[in-house]
Amino acid sequence: MDAGLTLEDLQHAIDRVVGNYLEGMRLYRPPVDWVDLAQSISGIRTEVSEEATGLGRKRAASQGKLLLGESLREESRQRLAAQTIAHSLIPQVGEALGVETGEKLPSVWVRILVERLMVPPAWFREVWREIEGNLAKALDRFEGTPIDLVAQRLLDSPEPTVLSIVDHGALVLRASNGPRPGKTLWPLEKECLAYVANFSRTRRMSQGGMTVWCWPIHKSDWKKEILRTVVSEDGDAPGLDM
């Protein structure tokens, strides 16, 4: 990426390109079947390969080839299809930014394109209002979309927010829209998580300027919990570095 361009410049350009693309495809609401969409695009070739590695599938996507397989989970199939479509939009992003797009493209371009394609911020805001802040229902609306991509839209909030995803008891994601919360959960988050993990019920807890929401994403063979933590500017959060 050009040294004179900021991440905000890139995000704005991608949002314009994605918005125009979705409107051109007459897509205005989730869910979207990205596999079906990719297969309907003449410039994208679809092949079946059970032997391809994850890296091999990504490389194929960059060349306009969608490598599917029976062993792939539905969320992986959808993300891979969106990656393939994202690569086809790279020239338009470069044009919007006024820069040349060569072979050695920063990976952040494709990552943000996929995030914005699968969960457009405007779509998420509309859904969030309709479901009154229930993330489990948002995941249902964006059916087939990887959980982490939907959950990350919580960081669009203007409030100091920390997002955490726990997979079978292991903290696999700890992200923030500003505060640096450290790599471990705070006591209130741990308490909220323990309740949700045990009872499979959504929980909201507040203490000392901190509010934690936790949603169970529990299936028959796996379980995840998603935590959204909002800290007021004068709140007392352990280890919070604003």
Image (cartoon, grey):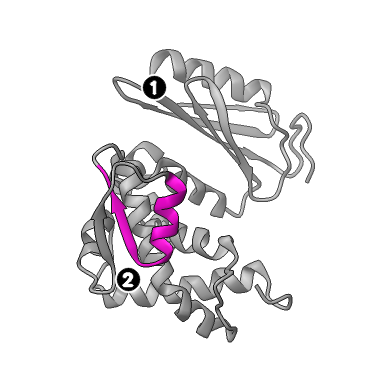
Q: Count residues near mark 1 (Cα–Cα under 10 Å), then give few for <14, some for 14-19, many for 20+.
A: few
Question: Which segment did they paint magenta?
Answer: 54-69
Nearer to me, 19 or 49 = 49
| Residue 223 placement (x, y as % from top left) | 40, 23
User: Is 209 located above or below residue 191 in the figure?
Assistant: below
Say which residue appears at 42% left-offset and 73% top-offset. Answer: 89
Nearer to me, 221 or 54 = 54
Residue 24: quadrant of the picture? bottom left
144 lies left or right of 17: left
For the image shown, how many numbered marks are present on the structure? 2
Q: Count residues near mark 2 (Cα–Cα under 10 Å), then give few for <14, some for 14-19, many for 20+.
A: some
**Residue 5 visible from this viewpoint:** yes
Magenta span has 60? yes
Label 1 secondary element:
loop
User: Is 85 located above or below residue 212 in the figure?
Assistant: below
Say which residue appears at 36% left-offset and 36% top-offset. Answer: 136
113 lies left or right of 45: right
| Residue 75 placement (x, y as % from top left) | 33, 43
Residue 108: quadrant of the picture? bottom right
Nearer to me, 93 or 61 = 61
Residue sticking out furthest to the front:
51
Residue topped by disc 1: 201
User: Is 231 located above or below residue 159 in the figure?
Assistant: above
Q: CA distance from mark 1 to mark 2?
A: 35 Å
Say which residue appears at 29% left-offset and 45% top-offset. Answer: 144
Residue mark closest to the camera, 1 vs 2:
2
Residue topped by disc 2: 22
Q: Quadrant of the N terminus?
A: bottom right
Identified by mark 1, the residue type is: Arg
| Residue 173 placement (x, y as % from top left) | 57, 36
Label 2 secondary element:
helix
